[in-house]
Amino acid sequence: MVPTFKLFEHLYNFFAVRRTILFSVTALIVALSFLASSRLQLQEDIIAMLPDDSSSVARDFRLLQLAPFTRKLVITLKGGDPVDTAALVAVADRLAERLKAAGIENVMTGPANITSGFFRWLGASLPNLTTEKDLARLAAGSSPDEVRNRLRISFEQILSPEGWALKGSVQEDPLSFSSLALEKMQFLNMVPKMRLIQNHFVSADGKSALLVVDSAISMTDSGGSRDLLERINGAISTAVPAGMTATVVSGHRYTLVNADTIKRDLYVVLTISVSAVFAIYLIFLRSMSAVFVFLVPTSILAIATGAIALYDVNVFAVTLGFGGVLLGMVDEYAMLIYFSCRQGGKDPAAITAEVSRPVIFGAVATLISFGIMLLSSLPGQRQLAIYSMTGIVAALLMSLIVLPHLIKPLSGLKLPLNTSGGALRLPRRAVIAVWLAVLALCSWQSTNIRFNGELGAVSMVTQELRLAEEELAKTWGNMRGKALIFAEGADLESALALNDKLFALISGRIPAGDLVSLSPLMPSDALQRANRERWLSFWQNGRAAQLGRDMAKSGEVYGFSKSAFTQFLATLTTPPPATTLASLRAVGMGDLVDSLIIRSPGIVRVLTMVPDTPQVVSALSEEMKSLPGIHFVSQSRFGDNVGRAIIHDFSRYLTLTSALVIALLIVVFRSPSRVMLALVPVVTGVLCMLGIMGMLGIEFNIFNIAATILIIGLCVDYGIFMVCRLTEGSDHTTSRAVLVSGLTTLAGLGALALARHPSMYSIGITVLLGIGTGIPAALLVIPALCSKDTE
Amino acid sequence: MTRILFLCAILLLVAGTAVAVQTMKPDGSAALFTSLERTAGGVSTISSDFVQEKHLALFKTAMTSRGHFYFSKPDRLRWELTAPVSSGFVLKGDKGRRWHERTGRTETFQISQEPVMKLVSEQLFAWAKADFTWLEKEYRITVLQEAPAALRLEPRSAATAGFLHHLLINFSADGRYVRIVELHENDGDYTRIKFVNTVVNKPLQADLF
């Protein structure tokens, strides 16, 4: 026997006289693991499945978090029928007050900070903002005919009831040049179907009001999200009268729905899997020793969870959800030891050494499967790998070192349900024929399988949430679903200059209502300087003087005094100071500016938003590459990219895992036919899983791919056990071990298939189908093929 | 914003025909206010011509315009300029309509969705309903003369005081309607509106509104 396997014989003999120490140390490790597990904090968000490396997907995800409405909660207040807009606005105010009373301070019902000086400032800033195209319009707007027409309108406005209010603007801007500047404001409308009524955000149909809540609570914080939403719902219940409704949309709601679903699933899955595994043990083992076999995987759960807690206290819920899988997976080693030791007939130390060979090979194959996942850029996958590998190693050690000391041989008695005294024997040809037919059918059906790479396919989205999103988009336009373009610079000026280039490139193709950009209102210093110089040049050479004469002449007709427009004429040749962030903040544009200028250490980003449509995305993606420092992030494209990245990741792992497992089998068996035999459960499991899913119309998503790795890891164990048993003269306890451990695995994974969360369900259904077909292949097909092999 | 506040103040003045009569109770002039309140309470309609004089530095001389004003309790108002241009608006409940000779267009609007008109109507009806609490909250009111009554109203809010220095309101001898309103701005400009040919409680044609 190989020295490695003799080691376990020596270890058995060593601990045979020191069992108290062995059991105490084991109990201590389990207890400490429980203690470490108590530090865990559950994380239920999708971050587990998003790359955290330096890839473009990871960068895009970080950039998407900077979008104005990504971080905010939006509340749509809908009026009754008929809608009284005044009442709606009053309720919006009341709700804002109640929210503030509930500790939610940053609530906006409208652009409340815009000051009365804003429009004056806007008009005065015109020389800083005027483009070549604008000047052409000014030239037309200052022709003698147009001057006469505009002064007539100004005259009439002053006589109207509104005249008192308009006197100042008539003096400062009698020809309405500032309408050019006002047009630039269209590029700052982030809510397409919104208008301002009584300084409140009201929908175009006047039936809904909008409240925007800015919260410091991260969307990935489920506890904080729960508290926040409870406070918001409390405020809504006291502020919104019957007949009106308030709908909250934010990432926090998604987090909460996913967290609640996962928690419920964890409870259901772990309860059912532990109970089912225990029941299987009772049926097949029927011995007090079985309790110890059961304790191995359950202790492993504690040890693996404790190890993860030591690695990182923030544990993805999906990882713990995998506990059920691990429970069903690691018991096969204990099972093999149990049945072999229980069968007896030899020195327990020798039995342990003998069984250690298939157990170690099986464990190594599974470790390879999970070890490959450590290379993943997905944090959830890496954590899962650590969790599973720790569990497998612990299970291996516990099964080979501790468990043999806890099992008493039956001394001549038969094992429970061992009526035939051997593995189930069916007609060899029939088994092979049925197997080939099933493989052929599944291969054919697997071509029907549809792949869904969207993240949404593995995230819990309730009907209520879906409807809320649809209603939001219908009422306000697509305010949360815009594609983002970031102009990055080392400082504000360089970022603004790049943003100017970007705006020049895209503004002609995307209408103002769809394009959100700071450039028209806040160009870089360099562009402002160029604009001012162009403005001054435009009014030189007698143009300003001529305009003054035309205005005096036309003004006289309407009774305007000679000095009426002196102030206006002076501004044509006296440029204003540059527009700065401070000046924008001073007139109440601070919130808007802060939404579009995002500062990080060493980087300033200026955000532009465009429609996230396939046409715009495909047209702009290529062009953006010509502007260094510009990052284009499309939410729709991001989902596709994540899907592609994950598929690429897993495809690589599948290939690597398959190659390494085959390499291991070659090393272990050194015979092509035996290697092929050991692969029978894997090939059968994977093909049948794909075929049945294709047949049932179940979509294949990113979690199904992850679960495929599990199928390989588990089924190859069964293959190794069975080939070892059949070709190396092991007894029939192996078949029993494979059957019982397979059933426990199915119990653990079957429970996952009852989960409501798409990610857990996907893992459950995949492994259920793969293992459910892999076990019969191991128990029936390998012996059928093996008899030929050995003939 | 300036425009909105101005318009509110202006229409407040227009509506003040009934208002001013009812609300002042400063300086021991309770008897006057009680009398004005009782008198104004009996007014259900007002029909009047007006002459508006704009004394603005913007013009070489005072600019005069003419028009008609109609008011009917509880919620109807028509302000119509006839010379030198034709324009105006009507408020009726929550609905409104405005027109202009130059554009040749008439457009309807919902008062609650027009901030300016909403404030106008709010103030108008506050005066018509003799909402003293609201008026005293908005203005400091001084009685300049008891018979016929003359009041001076100074805005309390800084925002309104930014463009409006004070209002002068002169009532008719019987206290039933406003005869002259003057709006004095901070820069010395002022507008005077004289209501002439005023008829109180005459049935008004429904199509006026």
Image (cartoon, coloured by chain):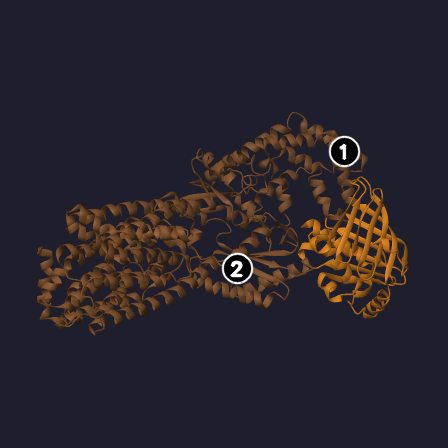
Residue A160 can be seen, yes or no: no
Left or right relative to A381: residue A515? right
Percent position of residue B49, x then y: 88, 51
Q: Nearer the viewer, mark 2 or mark 1?
A: 2
**On screen, residue A553 above or below B57:** above
Residue A152 can be seen, yes or no: yes
**On screen, residue A297 above or below A780:** below
Left or right relative to A269: residue A157? right
> Which residue is more in the foreground, B195 or A389?
A389
Label 2 to label 1: alpha-carbon separation = 59 Å
> Which residue is more in the foreground, A266 or A35?
A266
Quarter of the rendering containing residue A183: top right
Location of mark 1 (residue): A148
Which residue sits furthest top?
A541
Quarter of the rendering containing residue A754: bottom left
User: What is the three-letter code of the residue carrying label 2?
Assistant: Glu
Location of mark 2 (residue): A464
Q: Earlier in the sequence, mark 2 or mark 1?
A: 1
Element type where label 1 sits in the image: helix
Residue drawn 70% across the image and 49% down it: B3
Residue drawn 19% across the image and 70% down it: A415
Q: How many marks?
A: 2
Element type where label 2 sits in the image: helix
Percent position of residue A25, x then y: 17, 69
Which chain is disc 2 placed on? A
Left or right relative to A595: residue A203? right
Chain letter for the orange part: B
